[in-house]
Image (spheres, coloured by chain):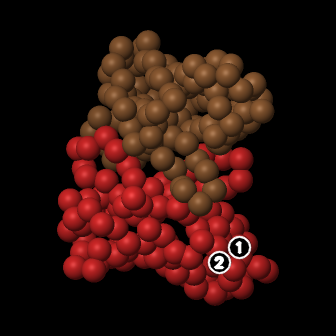
Amino acid sequence: QQQVRQSPQSLTVWEGGTTVLTCSYEDSTFNYFPWYQQFPGEGPALLISILSVSDKKEDGRFTTFFNKREKKLSLHIIDSQPGDSATYFCAASVIGNNKLTFGQGTVLSVIP
Amino acid sequence: EAAVTQSPRSKVAVTGGKVTLSCHQTNNHDYMYWYRQDTGHGLRLIHYSYVADSTEKGDIPDGYKASRPSQENFSLILELASLSQTAVYFCASRGATNTEVFFGKGTRLTVV
């Protein structure tokens, strides 16, 4: 049973364009939602995160949106750059619980 | 910067053999995790630990054991390696009062 579903599996965008990744989840007790970025040969690294009490969080070109009613979240990357090419994972957990549940990942390619 | 070091970085093992993957963190973190990454599945939690000399089962513990002899070290043990355990394994750590999880660079295990 996949508790966190992520789409699309892969995505190609032109340099300067906007990237949109989406996730949905099932467990309504989840209240912490991080996005991780992974480059080839590296481990995932935290990109941005949001708590369920918020509906939007920005960090430079990266913004994550959260919709509690629909149990969905998204990651928007504006002015996408070739250096953004990586695999992106959404994840979810209950704060205080030890377990992060990850989505399947999205492979993003940004073409110059 | 938080540091999680995994060894070896890659390994080829024979079916039925014993494999030990090691992880060392210098973050003074209480929590340590072992995840497995497979294409299309994201990262799945195998075992975790919140204190030395104690380990907990994650979502996919079958076929794996874990050992936490000290706060800094966490090992993943495959007593009888199988072809299905071919994957990339990530160790991670987290502070007790933080939400961010820090990952190592991964160990690519191939079972033949």
Can the viewer see residue B81? yes
Q: Which mark is residue A11?
A: 2
Mark 1: which secondary structure? strand
In the displayed structure image, the side of residue B82 where residue B47 appears, left or right: left
Looking at the rendered structure, the kind of residue marked 2 is Leu
Mark 2: which secondary structure? strand
Picture layout, residue B103 above or below residue B20: below
**What chain does badge 1 belong to?**
A
Q: Which residue is mark 1?
A: A109
Picture layout, residue B112 above or below residue A19: above
For the residue carrying disc 2, how many other residues have a C-alpha within 10 Å: few (<14), some (14-19), or many (20+)? some
**What chain does badge 2 belong to?**
A
The location of residue A69, given as percent across then percent down, is 22, 79
The location of residue B82, given as percent across then percent down, is 65, 32
Mark 2 vs mark 1, foreground winner is: 2
The location of residue A35, given as percent across then percent down, is 46, 62
Q: Do discs 2 and 1 share a chain?
A: yes
For the point 55% across and 42% down, the residue is B36
For the point 50% across and 28% down, the residue is B64
For the residue carrying disc 1, how many other residues have a C-alpha within 10 Å: few (<14), some (14-19), or many (20+)? many
For the point 51% across and 40% down, the residue is B35
* Colour of chain A in the rendered structure image: red
Looking at the rendered structure, the kind of residue marked 1 is Ser
In the rendered image, which quarter is residue B8 located in?
top right
Q: Which badge, 2 or 1, is on the more N-terminal residue?
A: 2
Determine contact: label 2, label 1, CB under 8 Å: yes
* Colour of chain B in the rendered structure image: brown
